[in-house]
Amino acid sequence: MALTQQEIERRLGQNHNDVAGAYELLAEVKATVDSHTTELADIKTTVDSHTTELADIKTTVDSHTTELADIKTTVDSHTTELADIKTTVDSHTTELADIK
């Protein structure tokens, strides 16, 4: 069965409307993608900034770790020296008691 001119025109009109609707949806999708692209760029900038700040913090923590290790070494040395001094004082105390 052949289509009448009117049916052909109606179908062409419907096809035109469908294509126009698809282009409208694609425009909305593109706008959303563009918005997401901008937001992702902002997030990347923030992450890059945080990465730099975290690297600076890590450097500071590493420096503090080294300094604390040096302090611990010094304290350990002082502890040994104080123990030696205490031994000497105890010896002197004993000797003084014997002299009395």
Image: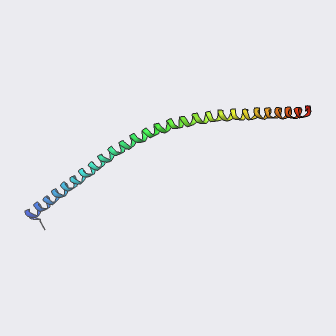
Q: Look at 46% across and 36% down and name the residue there.
A: 52
The quarter of the image holding the N terminus is: bottom left
Q: Is residue 68 left or right of residue 76?
A: left
The furthest residue to the bottom? 1
Instruction: Tell me the quarter of the picture where residue 13 sits.
Output: bottom left
Query: Which residue is painted at 11% across and 62% down in the image?
Result: 10
Q: Position of residue 8 (x, y in %)?
A: 11, 61
In the displayed orientation, state which residue is furthest to the left.
5
Front-most of 71 and 37?
Answer: 71
Q: Which quadrant, please, contains the C terminus?
A: top right
Quarter of the image for residue 68 reads top right
Q: Position of residue 95 (x, y in %)?
A: 89, 32
Q: Count the marks.
A: 0
State left or right for residue 56 relative to residue 11. Answer: right
Q: Residue at x 30, y 47 (%)?
A: 35
Foreground residue among 56 and 73: 73
Q: Position of residue 61 (x, y in %)?
A: 56, 37
- Image height of 2 relative to 55, above or below: below
- The colour scheme is rainbow
Above-or-below relation of 85 to 50: above
Identify which residue, 86 or 54, lies in the foreground: 86
Q: Residue at x 84, y 35 (%)?
A: 90
